[in-house]
Image (tube, grey):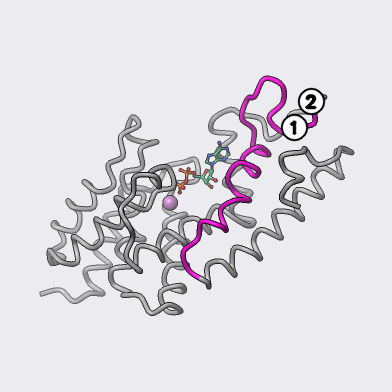
Amino acid sequence: MPDNDELLNSVRELVHARMSGQGAGHDWDHVVRVLRTSEKLAAEVDADRFIVRLAALLHDIGDAKFHDGQEKSGEFSHEILAQVGVDSTTREAVIHIVENLSFRKREVSEELTLEGQVVQDADRLDALGAIGIVRTIEFGAWKQQPFYRRWNDADSKGSDNQPTGVGHFAEKLLRLRATLNTEPAREIALEREQFMRTFLTQYFAEIGEALPSDLANFF
Ligand code: ADP
Ligand code: NI
């Protein structure tokens, strides 16, 4: 019987092989960051490390963006966990997390376990701070959206209501802290939020404009 570290290594290699090369902020590097943050949070709130690590590795394995809008993470997680020989109790705990952690599904999600809360927080933290800024810009480039457009009505969306990177800060990123589950994650989020405010303040100072009204609410 392989031990937990061997199982984790096998899962890690399978996820890496499947995910490397995906763009738009959902690549292997994102998974490694979420794994690292999850481990740190798990230690602070005393969550089960094995389940947390497996769920962090698998949480984006079947991201809908890469599968014609179909979310496949639960299904793919089941395949991988069964293939490497993870026991069925652990498997079910991990799949429950993977299937219920996404931001988009939060209205219909089942309540997460402590381990799930940890991985969800780690995933959300990866949308904040310097990394979050880079991912927002990368996502916008992938979607061919501008980071910001100058409009007379002083709202970041502009009169045609087209999405922009700056709009994403107001709509999602500066609201994420309030959705976090654990206290240590909220502390990290606060620091990362301050950095994003510093960045946005500098950005608008450099282009000689006031902050758009929807963003100014968060300052
Ligand atoms: P998750 O599923 O992990 O919550 P998403 O798949 O929604 O994340 O987004 C991946 C990354 O792209 C995140 O950093 C997110 O903030 C960023 N992103 C998502 N939607 C937009 C958008 N409309 N404009 C700019 N960035 C976005
Ligand atoms: Ni993710």
Is ligand 1 within 8 Å of the beta carbon of the residue shown at mark 2?
no
Q: Position of residue 63 (x, y in %)?
A: 36, 42
Residue drawn 59% across and 70% down?
Answer: 187
Density class for disc 2 (Cα within 10 Å; few <14, some 14-19, many ≥20) is: few
Q: Is residue 50 left or right of residue 175?
A: left
Q: Quadrant of residue 13?
A: bottom left
Q: Looking at the image, which is closer to me, 121 or 27?
A: 121
Q: Position of residue 172 (x, y in %)?
A: 58, 45
Q: Which residue is mark 2?
A: 151
Kindly check if marks 2 and 1 are in contact, taking CB atoms under 8 A apart as contact. yes
Q: Residue furthest top?
A: 160
Real-space Cα distance between discs 2 and 1?
A: 7 Å
Q: Residue furthest right?
A: 208
Q: Position of residue 214 (x, y in %)?
A: 72, 39
In the rendered image, the vertical position of residue 56 relative to residue 22, given as above or below: below
In the rendered structure, find residue 42 and report the number of the disc placed on it: none
Say which of marks 2 and 1 sits in front.
1
Tag 2: amino acid:
Trp
Q: Quadrant of the N terminus?
A: bottom left
Q: Is residue 67 left or right of residue 34?
A: left
In the rendered image, the vertical position of residue 155 relative to residue 93, given as above or below: above
Residue drawn 73% across and 54% down?
Answer: 197
Q: Which residue is mark 1?
A: 155
* Magenta segment includes 172: yes
